[in-house]
Image (cartoon, rainbow, N blue to C red):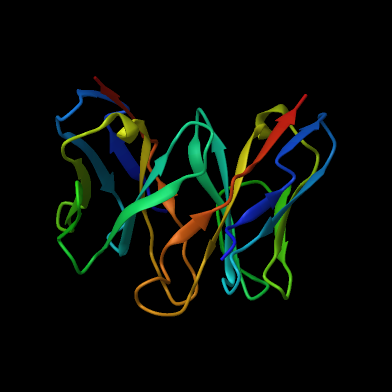
């Protein structure tokens, strides 16, 4: 089955700096790659996603890149703010008709310090 | 639209007991998935239901089962509870129509299960 590895497990950056989180996946059939942010005690929330037919996607300070050949994808957060502090999860999925199964990475705890 | 809801929010059980958790998806969503979240194992997929049929299953023992009703509400059952079943159980619903929104899974707040 699919296996997703995520690095680093913890990341501390100063406010205003950029943060990069990297994930690799094993199943070349995976075609959907979402990123979730989970604040302490709260539910995971989708922050950005990318499909396999796209190499890059950007939404304000957040961008995701996908390299299908190398089977890795990355989350980039620019101009980090204290409210970006949370645990970030990458995931990979094969969307086939009405079926979907998200395989998550182990999470990255991002700490943005003042 | 109301978000995904889960009941109960907290549950304490003892080893050997069984438990049933409930999930109500976003109105119009027909796909419901269940995940187990623990500090050591992260978020792990349990199963997905669509139109009352299980479409995908994760690598969990048969003690974990689920079902979906005609109104898309879903329940998850764990029998013969073990200490290691203590976790946050999250359900997520997904729309399956349209190219722009059908992929995103919206998570509920979770049920925190503690097995003593």
Residue A41: image quadrant is top right
Percent coordinates x, y for residue B102 in the rendering: 43, 71
In the displayed image of the protein, which residue is found farthest to the bottom? B98
Q: Is residue A100 left or right of residue B36?
A: left
Percent coordinates x, y for residue B7 in the rendering: 73, 48
- Is residue B12 shown above or below A92? above
- Is residue A112 shown above or below B26? above
Residue B82 in sight in this render: yes
Q: In this view, does B51 lie to the left or right of A9?
A: right
In the displayed image of the protein, which residue is found farthest to the right? B17
| Image quadrant containing the C terminus of chain A | top left
- Which residue is located at x 15 percent, y 61 percent? A55
Residue A76: image quadrant is top left
Q: Is residue B104 left or right of residue A7?
A: right
- Which residue is located at x 50 percent, y 57 percent? B106
- Is residue B64 shown above or below A6? below
- Which residue is located at x 20 percent, y 69 percent? A53
- Which residue is located at x 31 percent, y 35 percent? A84
Q: Is residue A86 left or right of residue B60?
A: left
Residue B55 in sight in this render: no
Residue B65: image quadrant is bottom right
Percent coordinates x, y for residue B38 in the rendering: 55, 33
| Residue toward you, A72 or A39 | A39
């Amino acid at each position: 089955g699919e296996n997703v590895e995520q690095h680093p497990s913890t990341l501390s950056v100063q406010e205003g700096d950029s943060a990069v989180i990297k994930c690799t996946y094993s199943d070349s059939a995976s075609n959907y790659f979402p990123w979730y942010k989970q604040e302490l005690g709260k539910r995971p929330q989708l922050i950005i996603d990318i499909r396999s037919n796209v190499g890059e996607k950007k939404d304000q300070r957040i961008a995701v890149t996908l390299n299908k050949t190398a089977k890795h994808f990355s989350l980039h957060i620019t101009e980090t703010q204290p409210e970006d502090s949370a645990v970030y999860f990458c995931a990979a999925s094969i969307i086939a008709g009405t079926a979907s199964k998200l395989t998550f990475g182990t999470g990255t705890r991002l700490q943005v310090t003042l | 639209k109301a978000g995904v809801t889960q009941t109960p929010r907290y549950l304490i059980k003892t080893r050997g007991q069984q438990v049933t958790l409930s999930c109500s998806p976003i109105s119009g969503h027909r796909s419901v998935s269940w995940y187990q979240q623990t500090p050591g194992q992260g978020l792990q997929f349990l199963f997905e239901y669509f139109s009352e049929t299980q479409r995908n299953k994760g690598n969990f023992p048969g003690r974990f089962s689920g079902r979906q009703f005609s109104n898309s509400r879903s329940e998850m059952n764990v029998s013969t509870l073990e200490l290691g079943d203590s976790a946050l159980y999250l359900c997520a619903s997904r729309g399956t129509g349209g190219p722009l929104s059908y992929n995103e899974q919206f998570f509920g707040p979770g049920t925190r299960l503690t097995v003593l």
